[in-house]
Every structure is written in structure tokens, then in C-alpha cells.
Amino acid sequence: GAGVSQSPSNKVTEKGKDVELRCDPISGHTALYWYRQSLGQGLEFLIYFQGNSAPDKSGLPSDRFSAERTGGSVSTLTIQRTQQEDSAVYLCASSLFGQDEPQHFGDGTRLSIL
Amino acid sequence: GQQVMQIPQYQHVQEGEDFTTYCNSSTTLSNIQWYKQRPGGHPVFLIQLVKSGEVKKQKRLTFQFGEAKKNSSLHITATQTTDVGTYFCAPTGTASKLTFGTGTRLQVTL
């Protein structure tokens, strides 16, 4: 079946603008994760949604970052008033039930802030 | 969250040589997963280890979980150019806070 889909694949925007990144998880997966990966670096956890539970937002770096997941499916990560240090690849993953399940990653959105 | 360090950060081997990456934690882990990320790609799940002292094999890859569940290793026998990429460990479980290891980048040349 279809894997995790992320859009856009690339986004270039000016400093100070808001951006929205979209993630379509695998159908039936109840857990959804957002990560950030800077060039040549590891994965930085941002936020975790599990079913109807309150999301784990402990990884969000500032209040400019927010995410929502509507209807337990599609998720949107929003970055307000973007800064140059926000430039990175934003990866979304989903898993069937939770953290003890394999995570399936999308291809990511490469965000460049000019 | 649980901090996991991976060593080495980078390794360059000749094709046919063996390779090992180690994942070390200061605290006891519940479970641990391993992922591979090819250059320009996204992480792909390889395996999950659950039991103390567990050893699992996938063709040329051998995964181990330490007896104390504080460390894990991935060993590749007779590397091939297709093994190129970054290997990440990731502790899982309710206390893990979804922290991936720092990763080991493997370069294989002919």
C-alpha cells in the first residue's frame, strides 16, 4: 500500500514568513511523529501524536512551532515567523500503534529559509 | 529523555571488510530499534531488540542487545557498497522520549 506522504517536497521561503508542512500517514496507523534533520546531523524529535491522546510536544524548539492532527490522520506542522536556523529537512513518520512499533518515514520536506 | 551515544561517528572501510557500530546508554533501555538512512534518503527500519542479551541476524547484519540492556551493536560482515549510509539506533518504550542515537556514517569503497 501507499507509504507516508509529505508535501511539499521542497519549500523555499523568506525569513519571517509562515510555512505549513503536511504529512499523510499510512492508513490505519495511529501514531504519527515529526522530526527535524539538519544537514549531516541526526534526527531531532519534535512532536508525537498517539490516537486521541494529548500530543507529546516536548521536542518543539520554540512557540513558533505548532502541529495538529485532524481526524487522527493527516498532520500539519506550522512554523511561524521562520528564521534561517529553521532550515532543515522535516521528516514525518507513522507507526501502527505506538513507539514500540517500527516507524515508517516519508521522504521529508526540505525547508530553506532565505 | 534517554541519551544514546553511537560510536564511531564515521567509518570508512574497503568493500569486504567488516563493520561494527555501537550504541551506548547511561540508563537501562526498554527496547531498541535500528534504522538505516541512505544518502539523500529517509530512515528505514531494520530491526527491534527487546530481550536482554538478544541476538538477531539479517543476512550479513548481526544485531545484539547487551545483557544489561544499556548497549547494543550492529555488525556487518563483508561490507558491500550497498551498505553505505548512516545507521541510527533508537530506544523505544514509554520512557524513551523518541530519542535517536547520534548515528554512524558508513562509507564503503571498492
Image (cartoon, coloured by chain):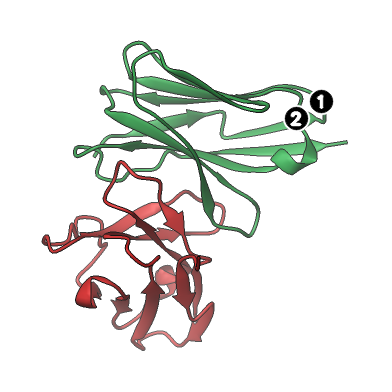
Chain colours: A red, B green
Q: Is residue A35 above or below residue B37?
A: below
Badge 2 crowding class, 10 Å Cα cut-off, few under 14, some 14 to 19, many 20 or more, is many
From where the camera sits, is residue A64 visible? no
The three-letter code of the residue at mark 2 reads Thr
- Residue B1 pos. (x, y %): 23, 40
Q: Is residue B36 left or right of residue A64?
A: right
What element does badge 2 sit on? loop
Residue for badge 2: B79
Residue at the farthest right position: B110
Q: CA distance from mark 2 to mark 1?
A: 5 Å
Q: Chain of mark 2?
A: B
Q: Chain of mark 1?
A: B
| Residue at the spot 54% in from the left edge and 79% down from the top edge | A10
| Residue at the spot 22% in from the left edge and 78% down from the top edge | A70
Q: How many marks?
A: 2
Q: Is residue B24 above or below residue B40?
A: above
Residue for badge 1: B16
- Residue B89 pos. (x, y %): 45, 36
Q: Is residue A13 above or below residue B87?
A: below
* Label 2 with label 1: CB-CB less than 8 Å: yes
